[in-house]
Image (cartoon, rainbow, N blue to C red):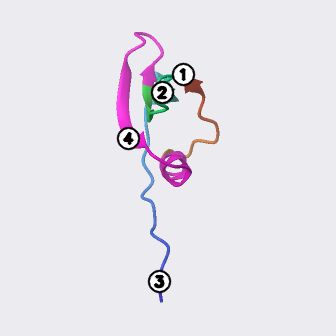
Amino acid sequence: MFRKKRIQQADYDRDNLRPILKCSICNGEQVAGFKNIHTGEFKEECFIANSAELEAFKQKYGITELPKEY
């Protein structure tokens, strides 16, 4: 019997970082990561190739909404 792969919970600095999905207008590439609200620096976490990977990222960090940034 196959079991669903458990996603290990992780945390991030909620006071200083904001989760965003960086999207390319040209080729549609999407990268999930965290943006520092004070400096604007983006830290790449993972490349998103499909909706399953996006859901896994959101589930890993307990995120309900992930705004897009172009």
| Res. 69 mark | 1
Report which residue position mark 3 lands on: 2
Q: Earlier in the sequence, mark 4 or mark 3?
A: 3
Residue at 57% over, 27% down: 68
What kind of residue is marked 4?
Cys
What kind of residue is marked 3?
Phe
What is the residue that sits farthest to the right in this orientation?
65
Give me the C-alpha separation between circle 4 and circle 3: 26 Å
Q: Is 46 above or below relative to 37?
A: below
Q: Quadrant of residue 64?
A: top right
What kind of residue is marked 2?
Lys
| Residue 24 can be seen, yes or no | yes
Q: Position of residue 17 (x, y in %)?
A: 46, 25
SS for callout 3: loop
Report which residue position mark 2 lands on: 22
- Crowding near pointer 4: few (<14 within 10 Å), some, many (20+)? some
- Please provide the residue range marked out in magenta: 35-60
Q: Quadrant of residue 67?
A: top right
Q: Are marks 3 and 1 in contact (CB under 8 Å)?
A: no
Q: Quadrant of residue 36?
A: top left
Residue at 46% over, 66% down: 6
Q: Are marks 1 and 2 in contact (CB under 8 Å)?
A: yes
Give me the C-alpha separation between circle 3 and circle 1: 37 Å
Report which residue position mark 4 lands on: 46
Q: Does the stretch in magenta take in 15?
A: no
Q: Is residue 36 left or right of residue 69?
A: left
Give me the C-alpha separation between circle 3 and circle 2: 34 Å
Q: Position of residue 3 (x, y in %)?
A: 48, 79
